[in-house]
Amino acid sequence: MVQVSYDVNKFKEIIQNFIAGTKSETLLMMDDLGQMCVTAVKPKTPKGVGSGGGLMGSIYAKRVGAEVWVSAPKDYAQGVEEGTKPHSVDPEDLIPWVRIKIDGNKDMDDAERTAKSIANYIGKWGTQAQPYMMPGCEEAFSLWKFKYGA
């Protein structure tokens, strides 16, 4: 899982405008930050081989106390965001990805050989970071601050 959290207490100058109003206005402003983050993160998320239900489909925002959490709860989300150290990967797990992303659904023997090569590479070098969560949330936070007068 990868998660970004914004503590409302860290941007009190914005909140003061809303606290003068109602608590519901403050909560709506927090919810808006979460939705803006989700909207900015999704297009930056590396595309998998599914129909959108993978990493991109897992991204959500929620308000927890005085914080707004933006999360991607997939077990591989942090590895995509930050990259990984060398680790073991079963080539069988890579075959569906290889067949769609690399081989264009060519024959199974080619996909198996390619998957084995990729698994060996990951075992030796790990994977490169493909940041999506932090860049998306930083972009959204800048827009949010502008929108709310910071």
Image (spheres, rainbow, N blue to C red):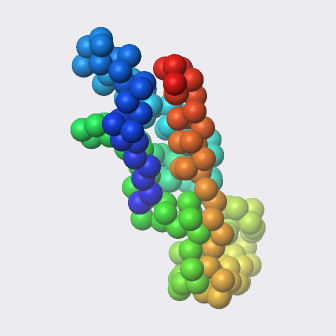
Q: Identify the residue shown where x is 30% and y is 11%.
A: 21
Q: Identify the residue shown where x is 58% and y is 28%.
A: 143
Of all residues shown, which one is farthest toward the top? 21
Numbered circles on residues, count: 0
Picture layout, residue 85 above or below residue 149: below
Q: Identify the residue shown where x is 26% and y is 14%.
A: 22
Which residue is more in the foreground, 146 or 79? 146
User: Residue 110's x, y, as percent?
Assistant: 74, 78
Q: Is residue 73 left or right of residue 106?
A: left
Q: Is residue 89 left or right of residue 8?
A: right
Of all residues shown, which one is farthest toward the front? 13
Residue 133 seen in the current view: yes
User: Residue 9's x, y, as percent?
Assistant: 33, 36
The part of the image, by quadrant, that contains residue 34 is top left
Which residue is more in the foreground, 123 or 65? 65
User: Residue 116's x, y, as percent?
Assistant: 65, 84
Picture layout, residue 72 above or below residue 32: below
Which residue is more in the foreground, 1 or 51? 1
Q: Is residue 24 left or right of residue 113?
A: left
User: Residue 137's x, y, as percent?
Assistant: 53, 42
